[in-house]
Image: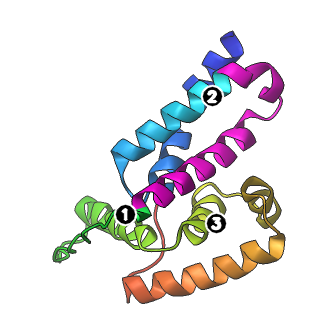
Amino acid sequence: MQDFEDFVALRSQALLRTAYLLCGGDKGAAEDILQDVLMSMYGKWRRIRTSPEAYARTALANAAANRWRRRSRKPEAPLELGAVPASRGHEQQVVDADSVVRALAQLPRKMRAVLVLRFFDDLSEAETARTLGCGVGTVKSQTSRGLARMRELMGEQVLTWN
């Protein structure tokens, strides 16, 4: 299964980033769901090897949604946002990225999944709809509402992240 090993070596970092954003910035949860998805993919590799990236993204979105469903049954204490330092440099990029992740974490799971797939994984509306199993119109409306909510949550901060 050398082709599976090659896929994991080439795509695991990008998939981990997607999982991290889908999990609202919880690195441990992102690593867990990615590992679960890759283990599942290994057993199904012969059937999915023609489009493993699409399968992985769909499985990650579903795993993150299932995680949020389980967690919604337990109360969670919100994190308090710290003061944003006034410096502009590499440190500010880290702070900006953290602000984006925190804002994404406050969105409903489907809205967060749409924004992550559209803007961080750079999928088209049609590809995002296929990945999430919904219509293009749903992707468009969730994108519009999600960006509006991100603007509310982040205030004057610019919605860009390298």
Under circle 3, the secondary element is helix
Foreground tag (2 vs 1): 2
Q: Residue at x 36, y 46 (%)?
A: 27
For the stretch drawn in magenta, the main secondary structure is helix
Q: Is residue 138 above or below residue 66?
A: below
Residues at discs 2 and 1 in contact (Cβ within 8 Å): no
Left or right, residue 42 beside residue 27 = right
Pinpoint residue 61: horizontal percent, then vertical percent.
61, 52
Give whichever of 95, 31 is nearer the camera: 31
Under circle 1, the secondary element is helix
Q: Which mark is residue 34?
A: none
**What residue is disc 2 on?**
40
Pinpoint residue 13: horizontal percent, then vertical percent.
50, 37
Q: Earlier in the sequence, mark 2 or mark 1?
A: 2
Alpha carbon separation for disc pair 1 and 3: 18 Å
**What residue is disc 1 on?**
97
**The residue under label 1 is which amino acid type?**
Ala
**What residue is disc 3 on?**
114
Q: Is residue 158 visible?
A: yes
Quarter occupied by residue 28: top left
Alpha carbon separation for disc pair 2 and 1: 30 Å
- Verify whether residue 74 appears in magenta: no
Highlighted magenta segment, given as a residue range: 43-71
Q: Earlier in the sequence, mark 1 or mark 3?
A: 1
